[in-house]
């Protein structure tokens, strides 16, 4: 029973964090982190990805009357689910946008670099510089 609750909690957190990351990328103009070319699609995706898990969290006790997850366990699951969502966002956005930023040198630094390129392109560029 606990594993089913654990898995549901992790999936809800994962989906919500991916939604928040897409909303933040769209708002900040970080096209290298977006799954969609148009920011309006990213906002729609983010809205659905945030509202559905949020609704599940608010109805958690009604839906799962038996069983609970202790606070320390929730913290661990939140940490790992959030980390997985960040890695997922970096990988998927890099795969989706890989050709869109081909041949463009990056001039920006910090998070602004994602306005011009993707995580994989940054990684490949850094490896080529070290050789």
Image (cartoon, rainbow, N blue to C red):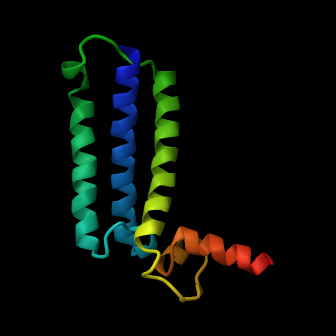
> Which of the image's four quarters has the N terminus?
top left
Q: Residue furthest top?
A: 66
Q: Is residue 24 above or below residue 128?
A: above
Can you tell which quarter of the image residue 19 is in? Answer: bottom left
> Which of the image's four quarters has the C terminus?
bottom right
Q: Picture coordinates of residue 113 (x, y %)?
A: 55, 77
Q: Is residue 34 above or below residue 2?
A: below
Number of numbered labels in the structure image = 0
Can you tell which quarter of the image residue 105 is in? Answer: bottom right
Q: Residue at x 70, y 74 (%)?
A: 126
Left or right: 64, with 73 as reference point: left
Q: Picture coordinates of residue 116 (x, y %)?
A: 49, 81
Can you tell which quarter of the image residue 22 is in? Answer: bottom left
Q: Is residue 32 above or below residue 82?
A: below
Left or right: 8, with 94 as reference point: left
Left or right: 50, with 75 as reference point: left
Viewer-nearest residue: 103 or 73: 103
Viewer-nearest residue: 82 or 95: 95
Q: Residue at x 43, y 61 (%)?
A: 92
Q: Picture coordinates of residue 62 (x, y %)?
A: 19, 20
Q: Picture coordinates of residue 55 (x, y %)?
A: 21, 37
Left or right: 82, with 52 as reference point: right
Q: Residue at x 79, y 76 (%)?
A: 130
Q: Residue at x 46, y 22 (%)?
A: 71
Viewer-nearest residue: 33 or 61: 33
């Amino acid at each position: 029973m606990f594993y089913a609750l654990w898995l549901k909690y992790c999936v809800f957190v994962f989906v919500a964090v991916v939604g928040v990351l897409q909303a933040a990328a769209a708002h900040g103009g970080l096209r290298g982190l977006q799954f969609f070319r148009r920011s309006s699609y990213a906002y729609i995706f983010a809205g659905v990805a945030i509202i559905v898990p949020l609704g599940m969290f608010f109805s958690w006790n009604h839906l799962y009357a038996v069983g609970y997850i202790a606070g320390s366990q929730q913290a661990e699951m939140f940490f790992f689910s959030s980390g997985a969502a960040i890695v997922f966002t970096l990988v998927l956005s890099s795969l989706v946008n890989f050709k869109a930023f081909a041949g463009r040198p990056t001039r920006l630094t910090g998070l602004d670099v994602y306005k011009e390129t993707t995580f994989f392109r940054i990684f490949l560029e850094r490896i080529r510089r070290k050789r």
